[in-house]
Image (cartoon, coloured by chain):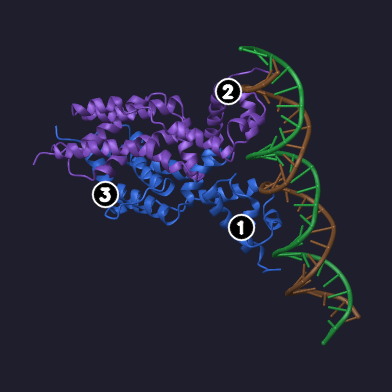
Chain colours: A blue, B purple, C brown, D green
Amino acid sequence: MRERLPAQERRRQIVEAAADLFARKGFRGTTTREIAEAVGVSEAMIFKYFPTKEELYSAIIEAKAKTEEILAAAAVAATSNDDAGVFRAVGQVMIETTEADPTLMRLLLFSALEGHELSEMFFESRVRRLHEFLSTYIQQRIADGHFRKVDPLVTARGFVGMVVHYLLIHEVFGVKRPPHSSPEEVVSTFVNIFLEGLKRRGR
Amino acid sequence: MRERLPAQERRRQIVEAAADLFARKGFRGTTTREIAEAVGVSEAMIFKYFPTKEELYSAIIEAKAKTEEILAAAAVAATSNDDAGVFRAVGQVMIETTEADPTLMRLLLFSALEGHELSEMFFESRVRRLHEFLSTYIQQRIADGHFRKVDPLVTARGFVGMVVHYLLIHEVFGVKRPPHSSPEEVVSTFVNIFLEGLKRRGR
DNA sequence: TCCTCCTAAGTAAACGCTCACTAAGGATAT
DNA sequence: ATATCCTTAGTGAGCGTTTACTTAGGAGGA
């Protein structure tokens, strides 16, 4: 017998190892044997804590869907109508958290592509919130007269799209970052284009 | 015996059915039995035409990577420096082809996530070309003095990102289109923001 | 006749999941 | 103190099924 751990701790280990594997290889691409090996216990332990592989996956998605508040900095900038601050904060935090741990993004994509039942809830809690936050802000700035009249939701999604695509090609498609372009500069480029493009011109 | 077909035709059927299944459920999520059933032949037929499931997958990716020229309209607009025409054509054709058949997009994502060996080549031939086409155009328009100085590649990817994200949330995450917003309007919104954001302002 | 296209009936390995069992440790009774 | 008992965390062997892939041979048209 290797090592006896309290149930809660062992359960946590299983979730952690499984999340990593599911994110890298998908639900169908990951075997319960692999997960057990990664944790360093027998396969039977997996099924002691989770009745099925499917329920282990669901537990992981539910955990990852719990949205630790990512929009704090952006919300602060929003209260003072600091346009650049809002968009920069959103872009920056998306890139920072995803580059620090691509697990979330890959799980999100895998769960949608593989058609997992919780994928919609996952999307709602991680992406829709972003869309709606920016959409609301844009709508308000249009009302203020600082932005041109545009569809706020489509526009918000456009900005998120620029950042997501940047992450997608680097984290999923393996495109190498050129050494001279930092994430900060990239976000700056996006924000500048975006705000210039939204500004209401004199009339 | 159901139906005897010439080898070439049967092979084509297999590729077609398999492409559809692989796009919907991924490589690991699709069984050779399913493919055979979809075609209406026995499983052994799959292995008559393709030595392994893996090689069938590769054949599909190679076929889908053959880039039937998608940039024709945009290239025409580019010769007359019709900025809106170029970006609108690119956005429009991306949305039209993907909505008509989401197979390509899903295969592209699945192959990258599942780590297929041809995924990089697939990405090069389908996405990188787009990035480079727009990047070159932007660079040229900066040289002309019509666009501000920006990183052309980052900027090109930003535009592609807006469109890709639109497709991603609708085709992969199943977000419903609101009835009043057509793809044309969405592309217009993106193009307008983008070109306004890139325009060199008076000095 | 003799290719060509096809199927039925396999195979071994891998899969999710179960079962019978054990070692370790703490509480209690003597 | 120590024997007894129970709970908890664990294992190893293997169940039935599904998987990718194979083999032997049959039917139909030139």
Q: Who is closer to the viewer here, D29 or A187?
A: D29
Tell me the distance, in whole angstroms, between the alpha carbons under discs 2 and 3.
56 Å
Q: CA distance from mark 2 to mark 1?
A: 49 Å
Residue C10 position (above or below residue C14): above
For marks 3 and 1, the one nearer the N-term is 1
Point out residue A158 in the picture as x, y percentages from the top left corner: 34, 37
Which of the two residues, B112 or A40, is positioned nearer the viewer here? Answer: B112
Residue occupying image coordinates x 31% and y 47%: A87
Q: SS for tag 2?
A: helix
> Real-space Cα distance between discs 3 and 1?
40 Å
Q: Which residue is mark 1?
A: A14
Q: Which residue is mark 3?
A: A188
Q: Is residue A128 visible?
A: yes
Badge 1 element: helix
Residue type at the position of mark 3: Ser
Whole-percent x, y for residue B87 in the image: 27, 31
**Above or below, comparing residue B179 to residue D8 in the picture:** above
Relative to the observer, which residue lies in front, B32 or D5? B32
Q: Where does the image place residue C13, in percent across and percent down from the top left?
A: 69, 48
Q: Residue furthest left?
A: B203
